[in-house]
Every structure is written in C-alpha cells, then in structure tokens.
Amino acid sequence: MFPIVSKRPLNEAGTVIEYVIKAPLVARKCLPGQFIVLRLDEYGERVPLTIADYDREAGTVTIMVQPVGQTTKMLELMEPGDELADFVGPMGKPTEIGHQKRVCVVGGGVGCAISYPVAKGMWEAGIEVDMVAGFRSKDIVILEKEMREHTTNLYICTDDGSYGEKCFGNAKLEQLIKYGREYDEVFIVGPLKMMKFTALTTKPYGIKTICSLCPIMIDASGMCGGCRVTVGGETKFACVDGPDFDGHQVDWDELIARNSFYAGEEEHAKEHICKITGGVRHG
Amino acid sequence: MAERNMSMTKNPMPEQDPLVRNHNFEEVAKGYTAEMAMNEAARCLQCRKPRCMSGCPVNVRIPEFVAKVAAGEFEEAYKIITSTNALPAVCGRVCPQENQCEGQCVRGVKGESVGIGRMERFVADWHAAHADEFPKPEKPAGNGHRVAVVGSGPAGLTCAGDLARMGYDVTVYELFHKAGGVLVYGIPEFRLPKAIVAREVAGLEELGVKVVTNAVVGRAISVDELLTEEGYEAVFLGSGAGLPRFLVIPGESLLGVYSANEYLTRINLMKAYREDYDTPIKHHKKVAVVGAGNVAMDAARCAKRMGAEKVYIVYRRGMEEVPARKEEVHHAMEEEVEFKLLTNPVKVIGDENGYVTGIECISMELGEPDEKGRRRPIPVEGSNFVLEVDAMIDALGTSPNPLLRMTTEGLEADKHGCLIADEKGQTSREGVFAGGDAVTGAATVILAMGAGKTAAAAIDEYIKAKNA
C-alpha cells in the first residue's frame, strides 16, 4: 500500500491538488518527464499520471491532479494517512535534458503541473528556460512561485486577462519568437487541442517542439497497445516509446478522437461516486 | 485396484450449457466428481514404459498419480503430482494435453486417450477443498542464498517454487498489481478462475516466496542492481511475451480496434465485465477477432459474453491450420462464434467520427507449404468484401517486451527480441537466467513452466558451484 503523506490545493479554486505519496521504489530513480500508474483500491482502474516531483531520501513522489474523471474525483476525497492500493513506476522515457541551450516550456492549465518538473530539470541542468504558463483565469493559476524560482523568465497569461497578460499561451510564445528569442527547443504540455495549436505555432519557425502525451493506457509497459499514437506516419506506443514526441509529427486529430473513446462511460461513472466511503471501497 | 475400464471414450466433462455460458463468466467445465475421476483412472493401462510421461514438460509421474486416483487416495495423488508440478490446478485446465501426455497415451490409438488433464484438475481441486484436513507442507530449511525472479507468470512462479523448495530465499518482482502474469491478465475467468491462481500464489508464499507487485524491473530497479545492491546471487527473467502485434493495415487506429492483450486485460485483470469495477469497456454488437490461436478464441468468447450478437474469427488459413487447441475451437463454435476462414483483413473502415463500421477483407486460397510446412495463404484477386463489425481485435501473437534487454547491458536477444538462453536457461550474462515466452516467444503455460523448472535446477547448480 502507498500512503498519502500530504495533500494541498495548488490554487484558490482548488482545481488542482498536490499529493505527496510514499513510494520508495518509484522515488529511487524517477526523472522529469516520467509517469506513474495508480489504482485507488481493488475496484479501481489504472490511471497514468506524470511525476511532478520526488524526494529520493524521503522515498516520496509528488503528483498533481485535476479532479475531472471518476478516479481523480475519488482521489480528491482521500486524505493524508489514507493509502492507495497501487502506485507503480517510473514509466516511460525521461525527457531528454542537456543538449539544449535555451528552451521555452509552455504549460496549459493543469499541464503546468507536468511541464514544471521538466522546466525545473532543465533549469537545474544550467539551461536557460523561459516558461509560458497559460490559464483560463486567475483563480486556477498554479505553481507560480515554483515556476518563477526555476526559470529564467516566467510569462503568465490568462484567457480572460484576470491575471498576467490577456492572451493564449501559443500567442505569447509566438510573440517571444517574433521579438527575437532564439529557442533551440520548445516543450509543451497541456490539453490536446492546446498542444496541437502550440505545435502549429512553432512549425513555421522550424523550432524543434516536444510534446508530452498522455493517451488511454492500461499497463503502461508496452503490453496493451491502447496508447498507440501515429507519429510521422509510424505507430508508436506512448508508454514505452514516449511519452515525449515531436509535436510536428504527431497525428493530433487521431489522438484527440482516441482519447475521447470512453468519454460516455466516464460521464456515467462519475455520477456514481460514493462520498460516504471517502472514495475507498473495501472488500 | 478397481476393475479396468475398457471404455473407448473418456468420461465426459460436465459443462455449462453453451448458450447459457456464453452470457456469463463462470467456469465452462465443471470438473469431474470423485466417482468420474476414479472411473476414468481405471481406463489407464499402467504401461510399464509410460509414454505419457515423456510428453510432459514437467515430468509429472502420471501412472503413479492415476493409480492413486483409481484407488481413491486423492491426497496421495496430489503429493505425487506436486512433487514435480507446482501448479496442477492451472495445468489441469489450460495445458494442451492432446499434444502432450494424452497425445502419447496408448489408449488414444484406438479410441480416446485417458483423461489425464481432467484427473489432474480433479486432484488439485479435491486437495484445495480438503486442504484443512491435512498438515501443511513444512517450510523448507533456508540455505541462506537469495534469488530474484522477474515476472510472476507460469515460468517465474514455477522457478520460484522449485527454488524455495530447495531452501532458497526467493523474491518475485511483478509489474502489475496482481501476481500471475498471463494467468491473470490473459486467460479468462471462465477457463481459469482467478481464485485458483491466487491460491497457487498463496501456496508459494507459504513456502516463503516473497512477491513484490508494482515493481518495474528495468526502470525502478535494474537487473544489475538486483545482482549488486540488492545482493541476489542469481536472477531469473520470466518476463513473458507481452508486446502485441498488429496487422499494420490502414485504419488500425480507428476507435474500436484493440490488441487482444488490451481487450483481455480490461476484462480479466481489470474485471471490466463486473459492475463493481471501474474499468471502462465498450459493449460492441459485432466483433471480428483476427487470428485463430488460443488467445483469439479467448477474445472471441469474451466478446460474446460481453453481449456481442455476432462474433467472428477471421483467419487467413483453413480449419486444418487453426493453431488453437481443438477443445477451445469446439467450445467457441458451441458458443456461436462464427469462423470466417481463408479470409484476411486489408483495411479497417470507420465513420466520420472515427468509429469502426467494418473491415474490408479479401478471400485467400492455400498455396505451397512454407518452411514450417504450413500451406501459404494467397489472396484471391478481386474477391474483396466488407464484413460489418463495430470492433476488431487483433490476436496475432506477441513478442517479448523490450524493456529488460534495453536496460540490461550484455543481455543478448535474437532478431525477434527473444532473449538468448541455452537449454538450461543461462543467458549471455553470468548469474542471469531466463525462460518461458521471454526466450521462446509466445508459447504455452506448460512450456514456460518447464523452462522455469529447468532454470531453477541450473540456478541451484550455479550457486552451489560458486560457493563451493
């Protein structure tokens, strides 16, 4: 079992929650860009989530979760001291860090929880890191302090202008590029449509653009093939060949369709979350 | 000894009615009663040179256990079987006996062979039901040496069990949240109830075997670290063949195309067929399963149980070439799975939202035999037609997962990704042994068990020599 060590909301609206989980086997070697698979209890589904941070000495791994689906909504009901049945990783290849001189990391909403560890990893490796963090509005901004501490420049933008600049992340990125910032790589994490359009932004400039994908998967070890994505015309398994891929090569429309496959089942399931048991079902 | 039973046919296996069972996940075959088992045992001629044993990859002492069954001494029979076979309740259910022990049986020359598998199953189930009446086997005295086993499928469990019985301190590392490998994620409940796998694993734990689930060897911990930091003197790799093959035809990314691994894992390991589990699954109406091995039969029979009105096996060769066990094919047909033979998909067709609506197929004919002696299927020009389905499941075989060979320096594999090991399971790395599907590519449970057994003996020899 994997105890929840701590839990805190990352913004005033409580749309993203940070959990620190005791998982020594995962913490001993995990790196930015890798992910875990968790299962709440015997009846739970296996859900992949990116590793946001880790503490090798304490044997803990941090995840940041937006309660939107059945499992994440049930996780929201769990408290420090509660235990997750399963927490396995690290899965996937780590983000390639070290060959870059100057990068721009773009995070969209909760995607900042995934792009922040990469920005931090790059910044700690001595790479100049600009970060564009886009949110819908001020109340859902997360990790501002952490991002500011681990980047050269942080640009926060909101769709409604309630905080930072009023623009979309891809517009801010394009502005920076047009003003002459020379990036040898752009790293994007966010909702699929946001990644698709941000990758389109960098394409005319010929800047290498890496996106972190999170398709539907079960085992996360190359076994089910559910996470297959078409990249440059070839079928890849996001769990073992990724999760990072060249954003200019990904077949985004196919991936968007595939990720919506169980949307109907998910809506149905969410109506049946039991708040009395605190999310965990025993038996 | 009871009087010899000279009936030409086996005692029939009590089974659920096909049109009832294709709507539930309960076990198809209900198992022999004690009376049936004793009656069947009396069909054995107790050959002086038993050919059946030569057909068994783990050398079960078949005539001896059958004699005990005939005499009604079932616990004695159990002891004889488990002296060489760690998983009798599993083997009695899923072994391809017709190609092994029963395939060699002299009674099979002029009639049906003795029902060895059915008796093995009976003995294992009888023991489980009466386990409380007998003293538990004593935990063997430890010899102070530690061995790590990677993967908890049939190869890993067998290797771990044999080593534990020799006194080794064994730890099994499993990536999934449950031990059992293909026995829990692949083979469906109606063919191998998961409670039986759990019972076999619990039996190993009673012997002192430790099972660590949620452990990704290759990422969280490397094989080298197991041998150095963790202090294991040898490692056995029984990581199976988990990488699914696809047809590689247009449209395979459409919604409703699965690997058999995905479809079966959702249902078996993740229990999507049960209302109380969260794992989502689609209830397709018309399903095509491509391929005709045992996995294809399992996927087709699962699809039927998930409520599909039409389930097709689509196979490019003919009935004679079908690689699945006869019994599985027979069961699938009884359950109204339809066989589209000499048929090969060329393209998956979808609607404007990307959902599968059919597969374009081409008819095939058989040409000259290939290097394996199987007649090569050749497309018949212009014979294309559309099979209307809303799901396609690829059951085309699997190859070993590349993770271990990618993360272990000096561990050699062939061009198919299969780990290279000698007949004892020794790999290209000292102290590292391997067996089962990780070495052979997708094969059977019993062959993997045989390999696990051989490797256990080789590991014992290796550690003894090293410490001599």
Image: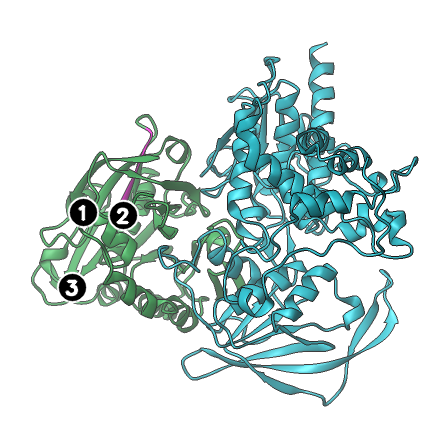
Chain colours: A green, B cyan
Q: Amino acid at mark 2?
A: Tyr
The residue labelled by disc 3 is A136
Identify the residue shown where x is 48% and y is 74%.
B254
Q: Give me the C-alpha separation between circle 3 and circle 1.
A: 15 Å
How would you rate the neighbour count of disc 3 (Cα within 10 Å): few for under 14, some for 14-19, many for 20 or more? some
x and y percent of residue A135 in the render? 18, 60
The residue labelled by disc 1 is A143
Identify the residue shown where x is 13% and y is 50%.
A11
Identify the residue shown where x is 58% and y is 61%.
B16
Sooner in the amino-acid sequence: mark 2 or mark 1: 2
Sooner in the amino-acid sequence: mark 3 or mark 2: 2
Residue B224 found in image quarter: top right
x and y percent of residue B296 in the render? 63, 63
In the displayed structure, does residue B353 sit left or right of residue B397? left
Query: Does the image show residue B445?
Result: no
How would you rate the neighbour count of disc 2 (Cα within 10 Å): few for under 14, some for 14-19, many for 20 or more? many
Query: Does the image show residue B73?
Result: yes
In the displayed structure, does residue B140 sit left or right of residue B105? left
Q: Amino acid at mark 1?
A: Leu
Check chain identity for marks 3 and 2: say if they share one: yes
Q: Are marks 3 and 1 in contact (CB under 8 Å)?
A: no
x and y percent of residue B396 in the render? 65, 63
Q: Give me the C-alpha separation between circle 3 and circle 2.
A: 18 Å
Instruction: Name the outermost residue toward the top.
Output: B468
Q: Is residue A63 magenta?
A: yes
How would you rate the neighbour count of disc 1 (Cα within 10 Å): few for under 14, some for 14-19, many for 20 or more? some
Q: Is residue B123 magenta?
A: no
Instruction: Name the outermost residue toward the front.
Output: B3
Image height check: is B90 above or below B287? above
Element at badge 2? helix
